[in-house]
Amino acid sequence: MCKGPDGKKVVDMKYNWLILFALMVISLVVASGCAGNSDNSSSPEGSEEETPAGNDSSEVTEIVDDGDHHGVRMEYYGVMKPSEIELEIGDTIAWRNYKPQGTYVLVSEDNLFGKQEISSKDVYVYTFKEKGTYTFGVEDVPEMTLKVTVK
């Protein structure tokens, strides 16, 4: 500490800068912790970590079954990839919205489940328990369809 011309104590400027720097670092750490990571690009597509159990009423986010897992991309230009797929009983499909922003409403034309709103980057998962041929579409986008054959 130094004394100013009026005799009062004055804090050195280097301490002011040090305090300012420390406050900025703390602010950045807090802000980065609150931001989160909405795009889980480090894990493979359709992985169990990013696919909550859509047709299970429990809070479990892990798929627990004996079947295979298949990913379906809901694209921005009104496309569902693949548009046809063959499965076995017990297999699971995870629909993921790849539209940069906005929501798709997934519809089971065979009433396997109610309408599912899938926001950008979100996933809806369904496990097939019976043989048959099923059709899925997107509300207000008639060209977005998926035909599923379960053997």
Image: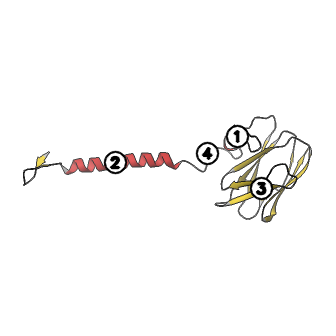
Number of residues whose C-alpha sits closer than 10 Å to that of mark 4, classed few (under 14), some (14–19) or many (20 or more): few
Q: Residue at x 42, y 49 (%)?
A: 28
Q: In terms of sequence position, does the residue under pointer 1 or pointer 3 come before the other?
A: 1
Q: In terms of sequence position, does the residue under pointer 4 or pointer 1 come before the other?
A: 4
Instruction: Identify the element where label 4 is drawn.
Output: loop
- Residue contact between numbered discs 4 and 1, judged by CB atoms under 8 Å: no
Residue type marked 4: Ser
Number of residues whose C-alpha sits closer than 10 Å to that of mark 2, classed few (under 14), some (14–19) or many (20 or more): few
Instruction: Identify the element where label 1 is drawn.
Output: helix
Viewer-nearest of discs 4 and 3? 3
- How far is the residue under mark 2 from the one under mark 3? 47 Å
**Dot 4 corresponds to which residue?**
42
Badge number at residue 106: 3
- How far is the residue under mark 1 from the one under mark 3? 20 Å
Q: Is residue 99 left or right of residue 147?
A: left
On the rendered image, what quadrant is the C terminus found in? top right
- How far is the residue under mark 2 from the one under mark 4? 32 Å
Residue type marked 3: Leu
Q: In terms of sequence position, does the residue under pointer 1 or pointer 2 come before the other?
A: 2
**Dot 2 corresponds to which residue?**
23
